[in-house]
Amino acid sequence: MSDTYIIEVGSQAAGIVVRDTKGFRFFAATRRFNPLEGRLFRNAREAERAARLLANGGLTVA
C-alpha cells in the first residue's frame, strides 16, 4: 500500500495525500482546494470524494 497519492478532479490536480499515523493528510495543489489543506482523512478515496464535492460546490468546510 502506498504512502502518498495524487488526488485529481477531472484532469486538474487537486493535491496530494500523505499517510501519517492517524490517516491521510491533504496538501492542496491549487487555491481552489485550499479549504482541504491539512485536513485528515481515513483513506485516499475519502480525500478524493471531498475534493470532488468541493470542486462541484457541494462541500462546505468549517
Image (cartoon, grey):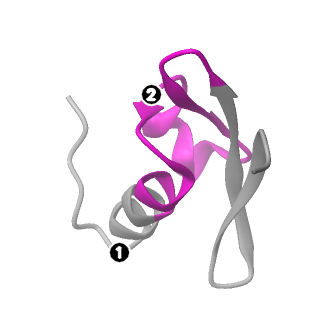
Q: Is residue 59 left or right of residue 21?
A: left
Find numbered disc 2 in the image and state the secondary structure of the residue it sits on: loop
Lateral position of residue 41 relative to residue 15, left or right? left
Circle count:
2
Q: Quadrant of residue 18?
A: top right
Q: Amino acid at mark 1?
A: Asn
Q: CA distance from mark 2 to mark 1?
A: 18 Å
Q: Say which mark, if any, is on residue 22.
A: none
Crowding around mark 1 (Cα neighbors within 10 Å: few <14, some 14 to 19, many 20+) is few
Residue 39's disc number = 2
Residue in view at x 77 percent, y 39 percent: 3
**Quadrant occupied by the C terminus:** top left
Kindly identify the residue that appears in the image at 46 percent across and 37 percent down: 36
| Amino acid, disc 2 | Arg
Of residues 21 and 29, the one drawn nearer to the viewer in this rendering: 21
In contact (CB < 8 Å): disc 2 and disc 1: no
Say which element carries label 1. loop
Residue 50: % across, % down: 38, 56
Q: Would you say 39 lies left or right of 30 here?
A: left
The answer to which image quadrant residue 54 occupies is: bottom left
In the rendered view, tell whether residue 46 sits above or below residue 42: below
* Percent of width and height locating residue 20: 63, 20
Circle nearer the N terminus (2, 1): 2
Magenta region, residue range: 20-48
The residue lying at 53 percent from left, 37 percent from top is 34
Q: Is residue 34 above or below residue 40?
A: below
Task: Pick whichever, 11 or 24, lies toward us.
Answer: 24
User: Label 1: which residue?
Assistant: 56
